[in-house]
Image (cartoon, helix red, strand yellow):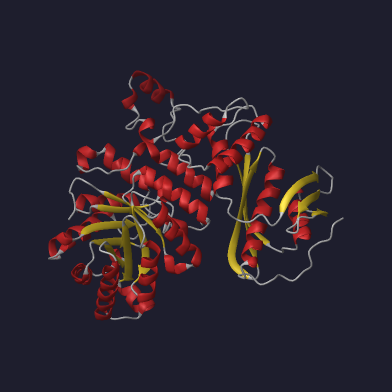
Amino acid sequence: MADDARIRIFDTTLRDGEQSPGASMTHAEKLELARALADLGVDIIEAGFPIASVGDFEAVRAIATEVAGPTICALARCNDRDIDRAWEAIQYAQKGRIHVFLATSAIHREHKLRMTPEQIIERAVAGVRRAAGYCPDVEFSPEDAARTEIDFLCAVVEAAIDAGATTVNIPDTVGYATPVQFARVIRTLKERVPNIEKAIISVHCHDDLGMAVANSLAGVEAGARQVECTINGIGERAGNAALEEIVMALRTRKDFYGVDTGVKTERLFPTSRLLTTITGLAVQRNKAIVGRNAFAHESGIHQDGMLKERSTYEIMKPEEVGVPKTDLVLGKHSGRHALKDRAIELGFHLTEEQLNAVFEDFKALADKKKEVYDEDLAVLIEKQIGDDVPKAWELISVQTTTGTNTLPTATVCIRNPAGEIVQDAAIGAGPVDAIFKAVERVTGVRASLHDFAIRSVSRGKDAQGEVTLELAVESDAHDFRGRAASTDIIEASALAYINAVNAIASRRQRGRVREVAGRPGAGA
């Protein structure tokens, strides 16, 4: 079934990638990233796990309805409820796929499922048949395949294909495999499964030992024709195989692998940056393909070589992956059209209403700093596309006092859900701590700060500082993320904290969090 010269790219950033701690996305953010993935040219988007939550179901359904081009895939365990829910989510997709999975390794059979090998095959066959009854495009994954006995793995794969699976995915679920071992598994399946030509072999590798990309490429070399991966390699634990690394390895070394993908590689860097903006998970400087240093040369010997012949130290051109040669510097005299064009180049799809809001924020920022860089613009845009949490509480102003031998204090002025202006003050260990305590007094939301980070969005002494934080409340195991940026990091800290408080308030309003004891602070 597979074109031997074509590798299908199955992107699971919105499903497996979102399971990475700190990478959860709102409905609007998922839809925006799905559109960017379609622009990137991936073949399949695994949009989520519909049975997991109402929010995940709604996001998958919205992506299936609104995003054209790629196949939209929904994940399901091998049980009727999961499969029915998955089909309900993707049934209106231009092209849909149901992806069912069931663990097969001895350790999973014994300790997690407590099922015999015969029961595993029976359950897998039933799941694939039910999915095939809804949708002709069905993928089956024997979870933890890399640690499954090869004879049993062959039997499960053969049964799944007979039941209607058109893609069989071989996951290295815990990143345990090595390239030689993993390639042997793929070759064995091709040699010993009699009906293997009726399905596409896929690989899905995790990075626990740092070999996800190497294992995936070994699978391709052995005959796999679909690779499951994520933007920036995000995912559970150490993450997944990085999409950008897979794609560029196949393209740059086409002389060796003899295959290619349909990915528009010039969209790799903008898509990577979009994901970083949405999740706040920064890419390390030396990250292959999309890291800040990926095309940077400091060594005098390297610089000399580059000046004489670029290929001496660069095996790829930065333009091939969408890395701009220079930053487009926008300023207060720039117009709406230039802003819109740059937003499109950065991979964002803005409505007129969103563009107007971003333009206003852009003008305000341009009055504060001399140059507005791409990174600044990305933060302003994300503020609009990701802002689907109702603003129950809104910061009007914040003032702090701090210094050596001075007790840090903060005064906040906040508009409450009723539209009233409420003020209060507090002292703390520092100005940020004082702000958080003052907000707590006004809103009555008692929360623990689990994470707090500040990073520079762009260059220069007047760069915006982006604050990302996570709050937790005793009545809910869910962490609430807040993010905001400003040229004033004190203001950014206050905005981010209130952003997280609004997420808590929104969840309470939906009846998912018990009211925390305590009376909202009175105005002063």
Q: Horizontally, is 430 left or right of 164 in the view?
A: right
Which residue corresponds to the image point at 61% horizontal and 64% vertical from the top-left? 507
For the question of whether residue 23 can be seen, the reply is no
Q: Locate the N terminus by quadrant.
A: bottom left
Q: Locate the C terminus by quadrant.
A: bottom right
For the question of whether residue 459 can be seen, the reply is yes
Instruction: Tell me where residue 472 appears, x and y as whole percent.
Output: 63, 63
Which residue corresponds to the image point at 65% horizontal and 53% vertical from the top-left? 499
Count of numbered marks: 0
Query: Which residue in the rendered view is the most extreme toward the right?
Result: 524
In this view, the residue in front, 440 or 36, is 36
In this view, the residue in front, 310 or 323, is 323
**Residue 441 against residue 463 in the figure, above or below:** below
Instruction: Tell me where residue 118 appears, x and y as whole percent.
Output: 24, 80
Which residue corresponds to the image point at 59% horizontal and 31% vertical from the top-left? 372
Instruction: Tell me where residue 226 appears, x and y as whole percent.
Output: 26, 53
In this view, the residue in front, 456 or 68, is 68
In this view, the residue in front, 432 or 381, is 381
Question: In which quarter of the view is residue 305 placed?
Answer: top left
**Residue 199 against residue 396 in the figure, above or below:** below
Q: Horizontally, is 112 left or right of 118 in the view?
A: right
Instruction: Tell me where residue 271 appears, x and y as whole percent.
Output: 43, 43
**Residue 63 against residue 80 in the figure, above or below:** above
Q: Horizontally, is 275 left or right of 7 in the view?
A: right
